Image (cartoon, rainbow, N blue to C red):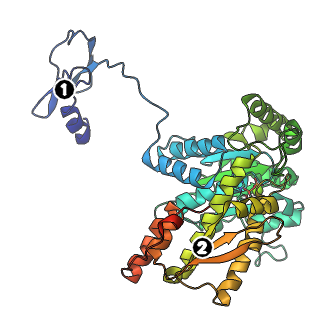
Amino acid sequence: MFPSSWQSRERNNKNPANGKESAKSFSGGVMTSLGGGDLDGRNLYSRDCEGPFVEKIVHLNQVLDPSRTGREAETLETNLRKHIVGQEEAVQQIVNIYQMHLTGMNPPGRPIGNFLFLGPTGTGKTRIVEATAESMLNNPRAVIKIDCAEFQHSHEIAKLIGSPPGYLGHRETHPLLSQETINQFHTEKVKISFVLFDEIEKASDSLWNLLLGILDKATLTLGDNRKVDFSKAMIFMTSNLGASEMSSLLAPRLGFGLSSSKTIQQGEALDEKITAKINRSGLEAARKKFTPEFMNRLDKIVVFKPLAEGDIRRILDIELRMIQNRIFQSLGERSFVFTVTEASKNFLLQEGVDLKYGARHLKRALERLIVQPMSNLMATEQVIAGDWLRIDHEEDQKQLIFLKEAEGMSINAMAHITDQSIVHLANAISASAGAFEAVRVPAARTTRRG
Ligand SMILES: Nc1ncnc2c1ncn2[C@@H]1O[C@H](COP(=O)(O)OP(=O)(O)O)[C@@H](O)[C@H]1O
Ligand SMILES: [Mg+2]
């Protein structure tokens, strides 16, 4: 018998080509044939089904769109694009694997996905894993990170899997890869673990063997023979293998010295030829280093691209937004707001970007040049709730200038001079604190950050 839901759907089955009821009718809940032949010139045929059913199939020849994703996968994609600049392929692959997981279409008995991320340092390999966890579990720290360089010797492997019963210290060791730790960040709704093996080229042979078992059978055997199930895990592995070859390919173009004419200009993408070369050199380096049995267990290998100047500028905006978020989140209704001029952004980029480390130093520069001076201003009450702080820079200066632009502003008014994505956070704060009278901000100053 057909399930009742299908029957009711069939009842509304209009032929999309002509809008008429298709050649099916119901008689006392049982589907019967209307007779064979041709309906409006369409080719029909009858197929006897088991039981009392005789079904007619209308050939629609309707073209479908397999590139569209469901709502949850779409949300993940949108969130990843908010946090990750460029690296389109990595975003796409994570979304694809997640979509397959949601529809139950990935191969059974294996992890949800096995990803290998290659490419230069500081280009977002780790960040994209955190951003995925943040989107799905609301927690960027919900990633179980294993730094392979730390597990070179067999006694260090015991930290991961525990030692066998009877061994010294058996009782004290809590294996880093036990089922409880793997599942620790699961929420009521989402039961997915994110496991990141960093710098796998540094893994010892014994770690490789563990890894191969996880990638292939989604199983790890602990020191005391208990099994850990990784079938609800996304496994990410990173390696900057081949990064130096990639940099030399880009040598005449790559660079973050912002005054240099060699930099990849804002908005200019790497051309296709160079992108293909980078991909090839990354894959070749991986094939040389890793065994075929490892490579065959990977679902996706993505080579991360070096960041162009425009990319780093966008990352700076993201990081500045995160600092403002931090202020709203930790100070609530006692928040203040800050904006950063173009001159100070250029200074921050000069200070925080290094040819070799991608965007890695940017955060540190922001902590040193913005967050730390700002907390001094807060501690000495030079900046208080409702203030608008403008951050500027003068040529040849080694520091930024902090100016009070306005005071006594409401949360809502503050939200409007910062990034739109912060507005909802500000609204939540002002709703919980009761209605504020929005303070008028002079029109000329109501520019967005920058
Ligand atoms: N593509 C990117 N999009 C957004 N932020 C990035 C990107 N690449 C690097 N970053 C920034 O640089 C920092 C270091 O990047 P990370 O992902 O740790 O580099 P790696 O590729 O070496 O793992 C991140 O925390 C993030 O702030
Ligand atoms: Mg990393």
Q: Please identify the quarter of the rendering in which residue 301 is found.
A: top right
Residue 138 position, x and y percent, is: 54, 64
Task: Indicate which quadrant contains ligand 2.
Answer: bottom right
SS for tag 2? helix
- Residue pointed to by mark 1: 52
Q: Which mark is residue 326?
A: 2
Please give the count of numbered marks on the rendered protein.
2
Residue 56 position, x and y percent, is: 24, 19
Q: Which comes sooner in the sequence, label 2 or label 1? A: 1
Above or below, comparing residue 68 to residue 385 in the picture:
above
From the viewer's side, name the closer residue of 226 and 70: 70
Residue 37 position, x and y percent, is: 20, 9
Above or below, comparing residue 210 to residue 179 in the picture:
above
From the viewer's side, name the closer residue of 227 and 19: 19
SS for tag 1? loop
Q: Is residue 396 visible?
A: yes
Circle 2: residue type = Arg
